[in-house]
Image (cartoon, grey):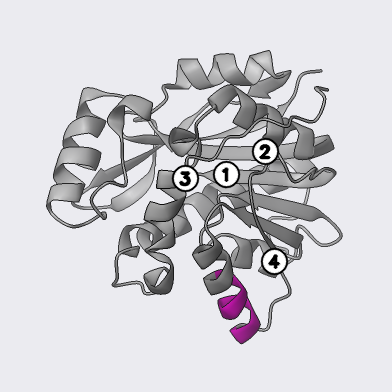
Amino acid sequence: MSNATSAHTIRPEEAAHFGKLAADWWNPKGSSAMLHKLNPVRLGFIRVAIDAHFGSDSRGAKPLAGRRALDVGCGAGLLCEPLARLGAQVTGVDAAEENIAAAQLHAEGSGLTIDYQCGDVGQLGLAGYDVVTSMEVIEHVADKAGFVAALEAALAPGGLMILSTPNRTTRSRLLLVQGAETLGMVPKGTHHWDDFITPVELHDLLEAAGLKMGNPMGIAWSVGKGLHLSNDLALNYIVTVTREG
């Protein structure tokens, strides 16, 4: 296990960009519409991973009952709320104060108790979480190794981490950056292709932090299926992560 990190991982310009989207985050037809389409795909993977890791009944409604979950880069809580409904005691961390305010307001309106904190995960001293998630975040941080170390420090012994991120491929440049942003499917300035991370690079970062990456599953898109889990990793992928040994 690595020691807790004090690395600064936030890029202020990234926090400002996503903070401007806060008021519209929960609108399924607004600027975050793509996240609303992506979230069910992520949740399908997450649920299977939770059941496999903790041995929970796939038919049960609360597989995370009695467990703590941390979502890093939580935005306005789009993943935190489903984790809470799965029974977890949830903490959500985000760099943008506007996102945290929107997340708190929405959770209150939904009757959910979620601990939302604004700040850099490397500075908050969080630890002991059975589940740590971070969706589409590592490509936005200033120090990827420091960010991974902070996630590792937050993970409880025997815990499960789940990460997703765009892959750095020609196809992702054409579709995620040039295509989606040009067509207005994703707000302009959301993606910076040079910061995307390949599965091999992510594996090496995790290994350096004493973590083991599972086999990645692609999140692909097609006309017939829309966004869906796939063996095609070219656009985006999601992985489970555990501690070595």
The residue tagged 3 is: 12
Q: In the rendered structure, which amino acid carries the disc numbered 2?
A: Met
Q: Are marks 3 and 1 in contact (CB under 8 Å)?
A: no
Q: Which residues are magenta?
A: 103-109
Q: Are marks 1 and 2 in contact (CB under 8 Å)?
A: yes
Q: Is residue 76 visible?
A: no
Which callout, 1 or 4, points at the residue further toward the start of the chain? 4
| Magenta stretch holds residue 104 | yes
Which callout, 2 or 3, points at the residue further toward the start of the chain? 3
Q: Which mark is residue 201?
A: none
Tell me the residue at 54%/27% (across/down).
Answer: 143
User: In what element is the residue under mark 4?
Assistant: helix
Q: In the rendered structure, which amino acid carries the disc numbered 4?
A: Ala
Q: Where's the C terminus, which quadrant?
A: top right
Rendering coords of residue 10 (x, y %): 54, 40
Rendering coords of residue 81 (x, y %): 61, 68
Tell me the residue at 76%/61% (across/down).
Answer: 88
